[in-house]
Amino acid sequence: MLPAVATIHHAGRRLELTPATLLAPMSGVTDTVFRRFIRDLGGCGLIMTEFTSADGLVRSEKVARRYLSFAEEERPIAAQLFGSDPEILAEAAQVVERMGFDSIDLNLGCPAKKVVKCNGGSGLLRDLPLLGRMFDRIRSAVTLPFTVKFRAGWDEKQLVHVELARMAEAAGVNGLALHARTREQGYSGQAQWHWIAEVKQAVKIPVFGNGDVRTPEDAAALVAATGCDGVMIGRAAASNPWIFRQMEAYRLTGAYPLPTAADRAQLMTNYFNRLVALPNPGNLGKMKQFATWFTHGLEAGGGLRKAVYEAHTEDEVMARVDAFFASELTPV
Ligand SMILES: Cc1cc2nc3c(=O)[nH]c(=O)nc-3n(C[C@H](O)[C@H](O)[C@H](O)COP(=O)(O)O)c2cc1C
């Protein structure tokens, strides 16, 4: 069963995750609006920002403001960085500490070409000595709890998860989250949860399992199969933002409620209202993206997706969502 609490600590600083669940960093998704939305729904132990370039952060305050602004109500919150220059990462980590984050996370899993090309994200999985220097420099630059999120290796022939986990622990990293796929796998195939079990057996620091958890039952199965200390959820949080609350109910009672159509209508309107309250040129795209995820598997969801996709303005999206749910919710 999912643990009630997980603790990440460093040098007298303790970060308690109650319950032991984490919102996975998702670029383009887990901005401050989405994070507050998840926080309000309840049940999430730790929230993370989208990944942020360490170089960008050191070079420009605008990057910090754009990607790393957060509200007090989001706490506890971790900032995720990517980069490959140990000195720049150390400097960026200090910016994160000064901004008041509760912990810092280093991304070693991103398969995106743009990130790998500059030797960030999963590209680093092929250069363990450089990783070692990065861990050391970040660790000595800040007193914040420091975690690493990584994939198991570049491909199945070059698995490094156990070696990397041991190295990180020796360098003073305080927690690990493994997305149990290789870089080559992208998002295809199944997450190999046994790699999470192998990491858990190799280190004493908390290990969080990530990959293909879609339901509270999956989360319980992941913990049972691996002994991991907590569960990190990505895509399922976008299609079912109630998942954290459901996991908490399942942990406490063995059952959890399913949202009704009215709950969905309210939730979608609530999220869209929050988006449009903060003027941002990306809002329309986010509304369309969220509508796609959120209506996945929903009866008549195709109609709503189409209606939202064909809208040209934020107001038009709102009107179409209202109209859709008004007809869906009208008793026949
Ligand atoms: C749209 C999207 C954006 C992502 N962005 C990030 C990111 O910024 N940093 C990161 O470490 N992982 C990122 N990921 C990977 C997720 O954090 C997570 O590891 C992956 O989706 C597997 O978990 P899931 O099966 O619960 O979705 C992203 C995934 C998606 C789908």
Image (cartoon, rainbow, N blue to C red):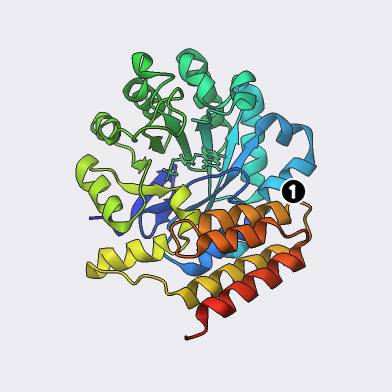
Q: Is residue 273 visible?
A: no
> Residue 299 vs residue 113: left or right?
left
Percent coordinates x, y for residue 80 in the rendering: 57, 40
Q: Nearer the viewer, residue 326 or 10?
A: 326
Q: Which residue is mark 1?
A: 65
Percent coordinates x, y for residue 267 in the rendering: 54, 70
Decide: is 26 above or below 302.
above
> Residue 95 vs residue 263: left or right?
right
- The kind of secondary structure element at disc 1 is helix
Q: Quadrant of residue 310?
A: bottom right
Q: Quadrant of residue 157?
A: top left
Q: Quadrant of the N terminus?
A: bottom left
Which residue occupies 36% across, 70% down? 258
Q: Is residue 129 visible?
A: yes
Percent coordinates x, y for residue 199 in the rendering: 29, 31
Q: Is mark 1 within 8 Å of ligand 1?
A: no
> Residue 38 vs residue 93: left or right?
left
Local crowd at mark 1 within 10 Å, few (<14), some, or many (≥20)? few
Which residue occupies 45% across, 60% down? 240
Which residue occupies 73% across, 47% down? 66
Q: Nearer the viewer, residue 261 or 29?
A: 261
The number of numbered discs placed on residues in the rendered structure image is 1
Percent coordinates x, y for residue 316 in the rendering: 74, 67
Q: Residue furthest front?
A: 332
Decide: is 20 above or below 321.
above
Which residue occupies 77% across, 32% down? 59
Amino acid identity at mark 1: Arg
